[in-house]
Image (spheres, helix red, strand yellow):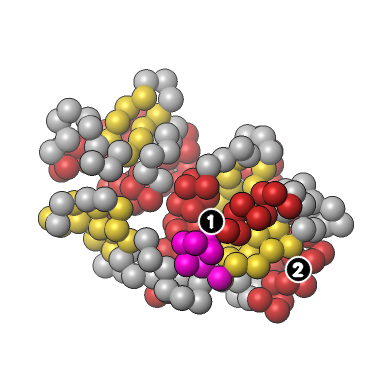
Amino acid sequence: MNPIHGVKIMLADDEPHILQFLELGLINEGYEVKTAENGSDALDLAKEFRPHVAVLDVMMPEMNGFEVCQSLKETEDNIAVIMLTAKDDVDDRVKGLKLGADDYVVKPFSFNELLARIEARLRNQFPDLLGEVVHGPFQVDDRRKEIRYQNQVLELSPTEYELLKFLVLNHGIVLSKSRILDRVWGYDFGGEDNIVEVYIRSLREKLKDKEHRVIRTLRGVGYRVDLL
């Protein structure tokens, strides 16, 4: 992905080594990045910096990530918020979502996972900032709602498009059925989780992925897209 100059990311975490690691990685990707080590400073920074995406640690001094998230969503226009949580706690996730968080990442996490989450939020909330995203043989054009594979346009239903986009943008990451359902079908989806299998089967047919080398199944864990 080649972000257009001027895409702003704010990082807030009270662990300096994490901030430095993420800041250097995101700057290397082409983003403009500023950091804060507590919730109060994060709010002050946001007013001045006006970031497109805020990455907030849940546990911070002075103001926690939930409080910062709520304030940002009340005062900033169309800011995307990604929460960092130290444990995969459903209560934390639900609380953050109710306060307006757009996504969450569980510590410890890989840089590529966070990068994929940021890319996804930018494409969903700021599509005009970004050009076409290219990942290996996949080209994702969110403005046209179109995905090309090996330079061929895939004929996809709206749900197939959202599912394949989610898998591709998170390539290399194993995604559980529950996480796929949350992101593609929504947190209030009341159907059976075997619908994921049905759509995965359809995508494999359209990708001519008979040997499951593109969309891999990790039994009992989930699915992962590998770029060939």
Is residue 225 left or right of 65 when viewed as pictured? left
Q: Which residues are magenta?
A: 25-32
- Within 10 Å of disc 2 (Cα), the crowding (few <14, some 14-19, many 20+) is many
Which amino acid does the dot numbered 2 rest on?
Leu
Between 148 and 74, the residue placed more toward the observer is 148
Vertical comparison of 96 with 126: above or below = above
Residue to which mark 1 is pinned: 25
The percent position of residue 189, horizontal first and vertical second, equals 46, 41
Between 37 and 200, the residue placed more toward the observer is 37
The image quarter in which residue 80 lies: bottom right
Q: Secondary structure at mark 2?
A: helix
The image quarter in which residue 225 lies: top left
Between 112 and 202, the residue placed more toward the observer is 112
Residue to which mark 2 is pinned: 43
Is residue 10 left or right of 174 when viewed as pictured? right
The percent position of residue 123, horizontal first and vertical second, equals 42, 63
Query: Could you give the CA–CA distance between mark 2 and mark 1, rounded to whole angstroms?
Result: 23 Å
